[in-house]
Amino acid sequence: MSINTVTSLRTVTTHLEGLVEGALADGGGLLRLAPCWVPRSFLQPGKRLKLHPDDLYAYGLNRGGIDERWFASTTPAANEGRTPDEGLSYVVAGQQRFTLAGAVAACGPLLLGQRLWRKYGKWPVYSKFFDNMGPIPHHMHQSAKQARLVGQEGKPESYYFPPQHNNVGNNFPYTFFGLEPGTTKAQVRQCLAKWNQGDNGILDLSRAYRLKAGTGWLVGPSILHAPGSLCTYEPQWGSDVFGMYQSLVEGREVPWSLLVKDMPKAKHRDLDFIVNQLDWEANVDPQFKDHHYLEPVPVADTRAAGYVDRWIVYGRIAGKQYFTAKELTVAPGVQCVLEDNGPYGLITVQGRGQMNRLTLDCPKLIRFHELTEDEVFCPETTAKAGVTFTNTSTVEPLVVLRYFGPDTNPDAPDLGAYRQNRF
């Protein structure tokens, strides 16, 4: 690298540092984020993201409809023909805009804290709204070990179905998870072998669960799942790897390339290798729901103070906490201060209020290029010092969702905690 290049990079970094510090000062320690829209060519939008109907195909019909909005993302979307910044969230600082990824690269310890920065050197997670008219193909996300074979990262993920975005369930509010106990690898291999004959029948080997607004699931890597048509809030690892194991969905072809896109090229026709990408024990688990289903768990009984903070994503995957999430509801006219253990991304799903110096306002309709006041990134220092939330409405609750990075909340409940923690 030349001296001029190094000098140029230092100049850019110094400029970004100044912009980030200025934005934090103006926002009371918080960063305002712009909406980040992501299309999927193989899916049909569910129309519950509040994006204007005229903008559902803003990337072009060939790119597919916009069915996802990503939050506090530093992860590029793995789409063919993608724009250079697709999937990356932007910070809005006055008239300036820059990616959150750039901000983290320039000010990592300031935004993430020393622990996350030293271990990962980036914001390693993201979340999204995932919104489709119907079901999507039975698929899996590779584990860290499998993804490394193609230079990627693995992807555990989680789901929560916010009631505010699910006034209608659309065409198929059921999700297939895993495989029926007793299913054999030979049966799955046979499904793959008849890919080009139409429906390969992979769902005949699985079990569907009815989805319920206000609940969720925690799903580890290498587990098959065919998400249903509820609009889903999805905290997950910062990766976009997947393999589709279903050849036909609602009459639409799923190309073989979407099955093998994140597998070594030499293995693209190796059916045994593809079958063995699945975590077999986890897929045929006869107690699958007990090991993956989530219902909200209150952090504490604060109803008398006019607000409730609830865990909506919690639990560990193979002993590791990859991410967690909370839902805060503040009654009209109430103010509260919340202290958290680490940085988080926040999205407002109902109402209007204030978060330190930033306005929170849940929009009813958004144009593709419009800025909003519903999304925020909160750095670690600010989270630990305490953030003041104020509901400025006299009639409607203020509801926000916030997600956290790995090992940030060791006090989070274990899976199944909802059975003992209700009020």
Image (cartoon, rainbow, N blue to C red):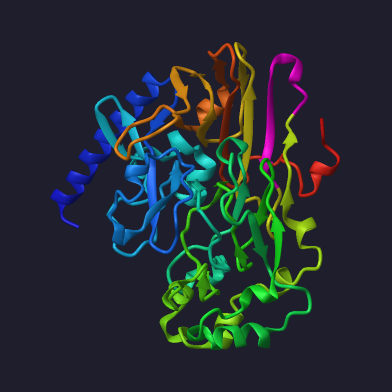
Residue 402 is situated, as x and y percent measured from the top left of the image, at: 56, 36
State whether residue 76 appears in this view.
no
In the rendered structure, the answer to whether residue 43 lies left or right of residue 98 reads right
178 left or right of 102? Answer: right
Residue found 61% across the figure and 68% down from its top = 222
- Check residue 363 for magenta coloring: no
Q: Is residue 90 above or below residue 152?
A: above
Looking at this view, is 282 or 362 the one in front?
362
Residue 395 vs residue 118, the one in the foreground: 395
Q: In which quarter of the image is the C terminus?
A: top right
Which residue is drawn at the image coordinates 62% and 40% (left, top)?
325
Q: Is residue 362 visible?
A: yes
Q: How many labels does the image show?
A: 0
Q: Nearer the viewer, residue 140 or 229?
A: 229
User: At which x and y percent is residue 335?
Assistant: 60, 13
Relative to 333, is 298 on the left or the right?
Answer: right
Query: Which quadrant of the view contains residue 180?
Result: bottom right
| Image location of residue 101, percent across then percent down | 37, 45
In this view, the residue in front, 238 or 334, is 334
Magenta residues, as a range? 300-314
